[in-house]
Image (tube, coloured by chain):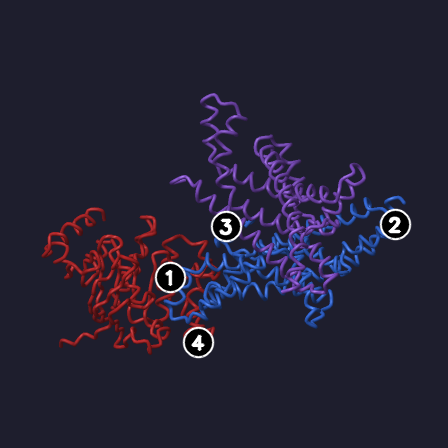
Chain colours: A red, B blue, C purple
Amino acid sequence: MPQTKKEIVKVEDLHKRYGKEEVLKGISMEVDEGEVVILVGPSGTGKSTLLRCINQLTRPDSGKVWVNGIELTDPKTDIDKARQHIGMVFQDFNLFNHLTALDNVMLGLTQVLKMEKEAARNKAMEELDRVGLCNKFMNYPGQLSGGQKQRVAIARSLAMEPIVMLFDEPTSALDPELIGEVLVVMKDLAMAGMTMICVTHEIGFARDVSTRIVFMEHGDIVEQGSPSKMLNNPDLPRTKQFLGKISDLH
Amino acid sequence: MDLWTYLQIALPKIWGGLIITFQVSGVCLLVGLLIGFPSALARVYGPKWLRWLVTAYIEIIRGTPVLVQLFLIYYGLPQFGITLSAYMSAYIAIGMNSGAYQAEYFRGAIQAISGGQMMAARSIGMTPLQAIRHVIIPQAFRYAIPAWSNEVVAMIKISSIVYLIAVPEMLYIAKELMAKYYNPFQTYFTVGAVYLIIIGILTILLNRLEQALVIPGMDVAKRGG
Amino acid sequence: MEELRVLVPYILRGLSVTLEVTGVALSIGLFFGAILAILRVYGGDLLSRILTVYTSVLRALPHILLLLVIYFLIARIVNLSPFWAGSLSLGIISSAYQAEIIRGAILAVPRGQMMAARSIGMPTIKAIWHVILPQAFRHAIPPWSNEAAIVIKDSSLVYVLGVPEILRQAQYYSAREYQPFLAYVTVAVIYFLLTFTTNRGLDALEKRIRIPGF
């Protein structure tokens, strides 16, 4: 029996300008539960900005954002509370350098969710196990490889039990041989039904796992559609040109 | 008088002066820390008016000699009926002075850390206050340790100016000894040696402290800043 | 204000002395500092180590102590006025710090520069003068600007030798007119203006001689 899909993220007419440059020119988009949306496009076209507008780390100049029915652009909304349900993974990992891997994952649980230390530790170890790093729980970020750091970062976000995960070029800062271990984790996440929006150049990942590919350029959505359509048979020649190029590389 | 006899008389007195030197340095460093760290936080995260105020304080203090600041408080304030003891004047003047310099070290540390760490903390739902308390401050402290070690050494040196307002720290004791025994060369040599030894020991201890607090793989500011 | 009018001549007398002390100290510091730096960088291992100990000791002792020590040491040998004893002392102290600054600036110039100069047959001294120092100069300006401000402020220390610089003048004024606060605040303002203009001036110089892409 077909269920009506729940709308997790809705973005309406977002505009954002940095100095003279307008990086978001009226973006609108909806993402339903369980969707895995990939944002692709040339660098500097607003993809990361769009992602950061969704959890309001960047405030748009105009437009509205809803996550799970709550309007985040409403000044009355408790944005910190809302962010508890949105996970974000950064290109530079941004792990808390002064804390062990375990403490990194636990910090949100004890300080934000106010969990008891024992319960937090168990949950944190669970999440580290999920990303395959429970034997590294005592290590500091400085002692981990890039791929390991990013997996801890993913565990840190997952521990908060988000309803949507935002990935901002999660593998761009990694050596090629370390990318795979991160993509495996992301793939498992997608298979388990997590709603994900990813900015990435990893076309293989997009092909295997995504439900929709969105091509952005110059602050606009040029074209979007299912992976098979976008990669094999897109409507617009520019889409074909760009996706063709990065397909070759990856 | 030969050096050995002299030392037997002088060293106990110099020791007394050394205690006072430590006392003055210690209190002023603490005052400086209590002023400097919040000032740094204010300059990075505070509202515009507060940033302006703190910056003005820092620029004025750093642009004027500490001796003038000391005289201003010790000799100048009594004109308005505020008469402070030599010790209090020293603590306030030199403490405020140290605070301005410490504020800059801490500001550098906080700014070096802030960007990505703040984003990560906010992205898991932390309020700015929580982020500052649990993520920024612990790292800023460690990052600033080499600079702070320099400040400790600098303070030992600066504290000697209080001899001019009759606080009996080492240099004051030295002057007393010279007035009594008429041997500036021996006295200054001894006091100079004591300063060198103390600073040498302090430097080693501070290095050990740095090593103990180091977190593997975490950056700290390079010495000499 | 009447008090201010009486204060001005004291201040002006003191200001000229302060400027002279600072000028002499900075110049001596620059001259000896540069020599120390060059010797440390190019002078070989043993010399480098001896000089490192020398500069470390100078930088570890309180400036006021060094002032008094050098004054008493020199007063025994040569008959120097307090002005010259004080300025010389500050110059020697500053040379230790400037040596570090200049040394850092020289080391910031890539090694290949000296190699290239030698490879076209330039002797070392010429290479240092024509190739290394002009580039090191640009690196040295920001920390030197800092040191200049420090020497300006340190000039207040010659007060202890009785030199009639601006702080001493303020004290004379206070003893006669009983307005210490006004006197010392004015002195503070003067010092602030001195350090402020020095820093801004050197900033402007740095911008003007900046090499594109360097």
Subunit ID for the residue under disc 2 = B
Q: The residue under label 4 is which amino acid type? A: Lys
Q: Are marks 1 and 3 on the same chain?
A: no
User: Which residue is rendered at x = 78% and y = 56% of the image?
Assistant: B172
Mark toward the viewer: 2 or 4: 2
User: Which residue is rendered at x = 52% and y = 26% of the image?
Assistant: C126
Q: On the rendered structure, is C114 left or right of A4? A: right
Disc 2 designates what residue?
B181
Q: CA distance from mark 3 to mark 4?
A: 51 Å
Disc 4 designates what residue?
A114
Mark 2: secondary structure: helix
**Are there few (<14), some (14-19), or many (20+) residues within 10 Å of tag 1?**
many
Q: Are marks 3 and 2 in contact (CB under 8 Å)?
A: no
- The residue nearer to you, when weighing A126 against B208, is B208
Q: Which mark is residue C200?
A: 3
Mark 4: secondary structure: loop
Subunit ID for the residue under disc 1 = A
Q: On the rendered structure, is B20 left or right of A51? A: right
| Relative height, residue B198 to residue A155 (above, below) | above
